[in-house]
Amino acid sequence: MISKPTTRVLLLCVASALSIALAGCSGAGRMAVRSPASAQLSGFIVRVGGPVSPGGSQPNPVPVSATAVVFHATPGQASISGKPVAEVLTSGSAGGRFTLHLAPGGYVVVAESPTGARISASKRVSLIAGATSSVTLIIPVP
């Protein structure tokens, strides 16, 4: 038979272990919680162009590793300004694809090289709550 103090210590240990396990399962700080008012932006970054093949055709688009950078769109302003709202690195082996969850609104998206140089034309997108908008960022190669 187990004494009362030993039983209390055992119960305290079990309760502590259970609370630690449950806290670990909550994913606090590890998972982005999407609010009902969030919107999704998905897209991919591809390289287009390059030397013409012997048959006279352009090469097919090639997915590339680059960073998709998202800025708030400023109405009536063509240039990108301010700090990025989001950035995501794409992988050529993953098809150059990316997905972001953002607040609804207007955004400008551009591809950047590892050195931070803008390597694609900017694209304006409007995100609507509960919907997915798509964008293709094209890196032209002469």
Image (cartoon, helix red, strand yellow):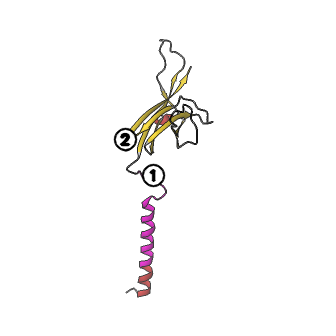
Task: Tell me the residue at 60%/36% (across/down).
Answer: 114
Q: Is residue 56 above or below residue 1?
A: above
Q: Where does label 2 land, which residue?
A: 131
63 inside magenta stretch = no
Q: How crowded is the residue under tag 2: few (<14 C-alpha within 10 Å), some, or many (20+)? A: few
The secondary structure making up most of the magenta span is: helix
**Contact, CB < 8 Å: mark 1 with mark 2?**
no
Residue 28 colored in magenta in the image: yes
Element assignment for label 2: loop
Where's residue 136, x and y in %?
A: 46, 31
Of the pair 84 and 79, the residue shown nearer to us: 79
Disc sitting over residue 119 in the figure: none
Q: Which percent across, then down, holds residue 85? A: 53, 44
Q: Residue furthest front?
A: 76
**Callout 1 environment at 10 Å: few (<14), some (14 to 19), or many (20+)?**
few
Number of numbered discs on residues: 2
Residue nearer the viewer, 76 or 15: 76
Q: Earlier in the sequence, mark 1 or mark 2?
A: 1
Q: Which residue is outermost to the right?
A: 115
What quarter of the picture does the C terminus occupy? top right
Left or right? Give the position of 82 relative to 2.
Answer: right
Q: Nearer the viewer, mark 1 or mark 2?
A: 2
Name the residue rendered at 42%, 69% in the picture: 18
Residue that numbered label 1 is attached to: 32
* Residue 124 spot, x, y in % from top left: 48, 33
- Residue 95 in view, yes or no: no
Residue type at mark 2 is Ala
| Amino acid type shown at disc 1 | Ala
Up-down: is 42 above or below 140?
below
Marks 1/2: CA–CA distance: 17 Å
Give the magenta-colored segment's residue range: 11-34
Name the residue at 37% across, 87% down: 1
